[in-house]
């Protein structure tokens, strides 16, 4: 019996896709940058089926690529073009298993779409705070494997901080049941944390226990004009001091970003009569007391203007105006796509050094691609910037494409010098795998390689992603 026939026997013929047209969404990534092919796309319906599928793949020595919503921005869930991979799509596994309002937890299948988990929490009067642009398509398993961040990390943390327990099927088909809802467990190595952020290289996450929070019923949102990035950092400190944990989002964008959004996004409107040098979207939330929250934010911003940290500020009067502010922030990525080719970098550096980093990066960009325009925005409170660079108007697409590798290398070398990360939240995937030796120490790479070999001795799981080829401990396939 062939592997494909064996897999069909486990999950049912209708859930093993071998035709090219059926496979297309599973082998082409979200951005259309990577196009692969697969021996089969397999869609199991339960954890038991995942165990049986992986055991069969292990016996056959088949390459496995775990996949959720396939929204990775680093080609993490897309197979290569060899046609040998079994793509394991978790999207049929979409049950909310349990909500515990006393323990404040939700237990879900890994294939649950993020927006569905948020909605289930809301219906129980709770908040599941992970929130990002792809939330209508991405899955909890993908969020975990990528350790996703998003717009509420400042208050609630990344997916790692939001997770209590995991259920994982190992590459040989054995089940690790770590589905515990414990907030305290000092009984040894945190195996859970190895799988979070492992980008599908160590096993398949099939279920998770996630933390829930009280639902914030009051929100106050403001759009603030700031003169410089340094001033924005000063404003961040002031808002934190005055508003404490209520600070949920602190999103920074430069005038170049705002200009792009106004030009390319039809329904985007800025609240200021003149374009500021930069702006910040500030959001506070609390379990109640909307009026008091608005007053607190307004008072803080008045003092910030007095201290020269802000030039102007508008506090949203209702939900519609708040959504319009978010549209300015969330429209930047869309506007960038419409504006043409850009070199993209998803970096983090220590918050206090962000202004110095941006100054040095600007000089590096100008030397690598004279006239190129940095489009800098991101989650300032997390030290995370989307440091994108638009093609200079005078340069051809070809000339800019030729300059991008040097430009990216220079930006990333600077990130490493500032003890930052070349992937704050989008993952390494296949996009950045070649840069790992430049940003991790030999010891870090050795330990990562040894862990990989422990879990996946033949390196069959998601090859070509996260771990650079040629690590010393890698055995031949
Ligand atoms: P996939 O893309 O299917 O897979 C991602 C990785 O996880 C792959 O390596 C895959 O092999 C692995 N994987 C998937 N499921 C499993 C599983 N069950 N077990 C083991 N491994 C698995 N990210 C942020 O952090 N913050 C943002 O603000 C943000 N904004 C985004 C906005 C847009 C419009 C888009 C398209 C993406 C954005 N992302 C953001 C990227 C983000 O990482 C992904 O959207 C999401 O976390 C991936 O989930 P997914 O289910 O689509 O995973």
Image (cartoon, rainbow, N blue to C red):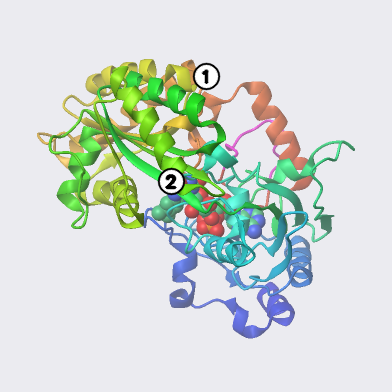
* Spatial separation of the CA atoms under disc 1 and disc 2: 41 Å
Q: Earlier in the sequence, mark 1 or mark 2?
A: 2
Report the residue marked by disc 2: 291
Q: Residue furthest left?
A: 394
The residue depicted at 47 percent of the width and 24 percent of the height is 349
Question: Percent from the top left, x then y, of residue 291?
Answer: 43, 46
Q: Taking 471 as reference, is 280 left or right?
A: left
Q: Is mark 1 within 8 Å of ligand 1?
A: no
In this orientation, which residue lies closer to the viewer: 318 or 43? 318
Give the secondary structure at mark 2. helix
For residue 255, what is the image quadrant? top left
Report the residue marked by disc 1: 419
* Figure check: 77 above or below 154: below
Question: Percent from the top left, x then y, of residue 238?
Answer: 44, 23
Q: Residue furthest bottom?
A: 13
For residue 229, what is the image quadrant? top left
In this orientation, which residue lies closer to the viewer: 178 or 275? 275
* Numbered marks: total: 2
Residue 474 lies in the magenta stretch: yes
For residue 68, what is the image quadrant? bottom right
Question: Percent from the top left, x then y, of residue 444?
Answer: 66, 26
Q: Which residues are magenta?
A: 466-477
* Disc marking residue 411: none
Q: Is mark 2 within 8 Å of ligand 1?
A: no
In the image, which is nearer the foreground, mark 1 or mark 2? 2
* Figure check: 248 above or below 13: above
Q: Taking 469 as reference, is 332 left or right?
A: left
In the rendered view of the protein, which quadrant contains the N terminus?
Answer: bottom right
Give the secondary structure at mark 1. loop
The residue depicted at 73 percent of the width and 82 percent of the height is 9
Residue 261 visible in the displayed image: yes
Q: Taking 397 as reference, is 458 left or right?
A: right
């Amino acid at each position: 019996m062939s592997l494909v026939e064996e897999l069909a026997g486990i999950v049912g013929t209708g859930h093993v896709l071998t035709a090219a047209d059926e496979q297309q969404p599973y082998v082409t990534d979200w951005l259309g940058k990577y196009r692969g092919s697969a021996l089969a796309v397999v869609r199991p319906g339960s954890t038991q089926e995942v165990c049986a599928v992986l055991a069969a793949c292990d016996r056959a020595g088949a390459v496995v690529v775990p996949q959720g919503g396939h929204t990775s921005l680093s080609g993490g869930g897309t197979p290569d073009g060899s046609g040998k991979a079994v793509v394991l799509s978790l999207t049929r596994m979409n049950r909310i298993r349990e909500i515990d309002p006393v323990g404040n937890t939700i237990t879900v299948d890994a294939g649950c779409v993020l927006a569905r988990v948020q909605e289930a929490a809301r219906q129980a009067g709770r908040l599941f705070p992970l929130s990002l642009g792809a939330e209508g398509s991405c899955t909890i398993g993908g969020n975990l494997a990528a350790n996703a961040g998003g717009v509420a990390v400042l208050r609630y943390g990344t997916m790692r901080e939001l997770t209590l327990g995991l259920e994982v099927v190992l590459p040989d088909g054995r089940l690790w049941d770590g589905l515990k809802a414990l907030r305290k467990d000092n009984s040894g190595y945190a195996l859970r944390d190895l799988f979070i952020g492992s980008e599908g290289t160590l096993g398949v996450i099939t279920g998770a226990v996630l933390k829930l929070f009280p639902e914030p019923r009051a929100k106050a949102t403001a759009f603030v004009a700031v003169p410089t990035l340094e001033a924005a950092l000063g404003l961040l400190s002031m808002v934190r001091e005055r508003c404490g944990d209520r600070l949920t989002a602190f999103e920074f964008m430069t005038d170049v970003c705002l200009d792009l959004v106004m030009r390319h996004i039809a329904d985007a409107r800025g609240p200021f009569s003149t374009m500021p040098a930069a702006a910040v979207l500030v959001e506070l939330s609390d379990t109640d007391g909307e009026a008091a929250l608005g007053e607190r934010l307004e008072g803080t911003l008045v003092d910030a203007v007095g201290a020269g940290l802000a030039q102007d500020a508008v506090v949203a009067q209702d939900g519609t105006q708040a959504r319009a502010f978010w549209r300015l922030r969330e429209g930047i990525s869309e506007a960038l796509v419409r504006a043409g080719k850009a070199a993209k970098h998803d970096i983090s550096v220590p918050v206090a050094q962000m202004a110095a980093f941006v100054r040095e990066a600007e000089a590096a960009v100008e030397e690598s691609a004279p006239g190129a325009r940095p489009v800098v925005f991101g989650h300032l409170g997390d030290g995370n910037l989307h440091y994108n660079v638009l093609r200079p108007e005078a340069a051809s697409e070809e000339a800019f494409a030729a300059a991008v590798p040097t430009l990216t290398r220079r930006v990333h070398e600077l990130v490493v010098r500032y003890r930052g990360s070349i992937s704050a939240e989008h993952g390494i995937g296949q996009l950045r795998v070649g840069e790992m030796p430049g940003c991790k120490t030999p010891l870090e790479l050795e330990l990562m390689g040894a862990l990989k070999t422990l879990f996946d001795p033949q390196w069959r799981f998601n090859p070509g992603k996260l771990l650079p080829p040629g690590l010393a401990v890698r055995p031949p396939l």
